[in-house]
Image: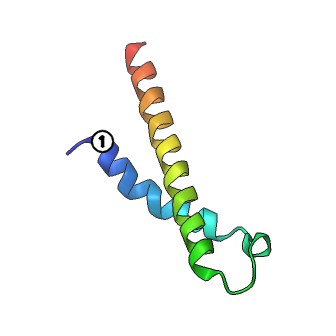
Amino acid sequence: MSIKIILYCIIIPFSIWIVTSTNLDKLFKKNSIMQIHSLYFILSLILSYLLVNFLVDIYGTISLL
């Protein structure tokens, strides 16, 4: 199994937990729950992608030394 898949499985729930702790409800109209949840999901995927690639790049850089 690829290390990226393992990292995604660990980091995606963590990023969802972080993103849902923010109060983005004030940016949306009242009763737009689906839009808020969609934004949370997209933001968590973006954060997970960036963090996994950062960790893999750091690991690759350290292994070259």
Name the side, left or right, on which 35 lies relative to 10.
Answer: right
- Toward the left, the furthest residue is 1
| Residue 48 on image: x %, y % | 49, 50
- Toward the top, the furthest residue is 65
Whether residue 12 is situated above or below residue 27 in the rendered picture = above
Q: Which residue is painted at 48% across and 28% down in the image?
A: 58
| Residue 9 on image: x %, y % | 36, 57
Q: Which residue is painted at 54% across and 68% down in the image?
A: 38
Quadrant of residue 22 within the rendered picture: bottom right
In this figure, which residue is indicated by the disc labeled 1? Answer: 3
Quadrant of residue 34 within the rendered picture: bottom right
Name the side, left or right, on which 15 lies relative to 60.
Answer: right
Whether residue 51 is situated above or below residue 14 in the rendered picture = above
Which residue is more in the foreground, 37 or 31?
Answer: 31
Name the side, left or right, on which 28 lies relative to 46.
Answer: right
| Residue 13 on image: x %, y % | 46, 64
| Residue 57 on image: x %, y % | 45, 28
Whether residue 49 is situated above or below residue 10 in the rendered picture = above
**Neighbour tally class for label 1: few under 14, some 14-19, many 20 plus, Cα within 10 Å:** few
**Please, which colouring scheme is shown?**
rainbow
- Toward the bottom, the furthest residue is 31
Residue type marked 1? Ile
